[in-house]
Amino acid sequence: MNRPSCGGLWSRTSRQGNKFLSGEIELGGQKYRIVIFANGLKKAGEKTPDYRIFESEPPQTQGAGENSDPKPFVADDSDVPF
């Protein structure tokens, strides 16, 4: 079976030392930037997900002028509760 790819993920480490995945997927012609974290609150025997997927924040720009370059995307998981 040879299905076309709908995106890709890269392994990352946050400033706090937590490992996560980040990347982009395309669904229905729409592209989404995502981050994936292990569900640190999961307990043995629970039917909760092993991983949680979040849509990434769009890159911030410094100004609205033509010469302003967007800041590179940096994932920050400091507000994620696990």
Image (cartoon, rainbow, N blue to C red):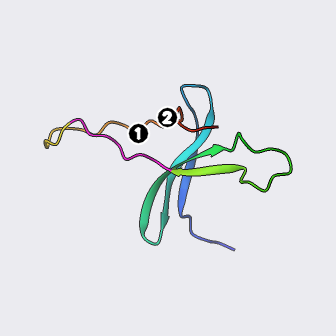
Which residue has dot 1 on it? 73
Which is nearer the eye, 45 or 26? 45
Q: Horizontal and vertical percent for residue 68?
A: 19, 38
Which residue has dot 2 on it? 76
What element does badge 1 sit on?
Answer: loop
For label 2, the crowd category at 10 Å Cα-Cα, with few meaning under 14, some 14 to 19 and many 20 or more, is some
Q: Horizontal and vertical percent for residue 2?
A: 65, 72
Quarter of the C terminus within the rendering: top right
Magenta stretch in the rendered image: 55-62
The amino acid on which the numbered mark 2 sits, given as a three-letter code, is: Asp
Q: Is residue 82 left or right of residue 60?
A: right
The amino acid on which the numbered mark 1 sits, given as a three-letter code, is: Phe
Which is nearer the eye, 41 or 17? 41
Figure quadrant of residue 41:
top right
Figure quadrant of residue 13:
top right
Q: Nearer the viewer, mark 1 or mark 2?
A: 2
Quarter of the N terminus within the rendering: bottom right
- The label on residue 46 is none
Q: Is residue 16 above or below residue 10?
A: above
Query: Do callouts 1 and 2 mark residues in contact (Cβ within 8 Å)?
Result: no
Residue farthest toward the right in the current orientation of the protein? 45
Q: Horizontal and vertical percent for residue 45?
A: 86, 51
Residue farthest toward the top in the current orientation of the protein? 16
Which is nearer the eye, 27 or 4? 27
Query: How would you classify the magenta stretch by its main secondary structure?
Result: loop
Q: Is residue 55 above or below residue 68?
A: below
Residue drawn at point x = 14 percent, y = 43 percent: 66
Q: Is residue 51 magenta?
A: no
Q: Horizontal and vertical percent for residue 76?
A: 49, 34
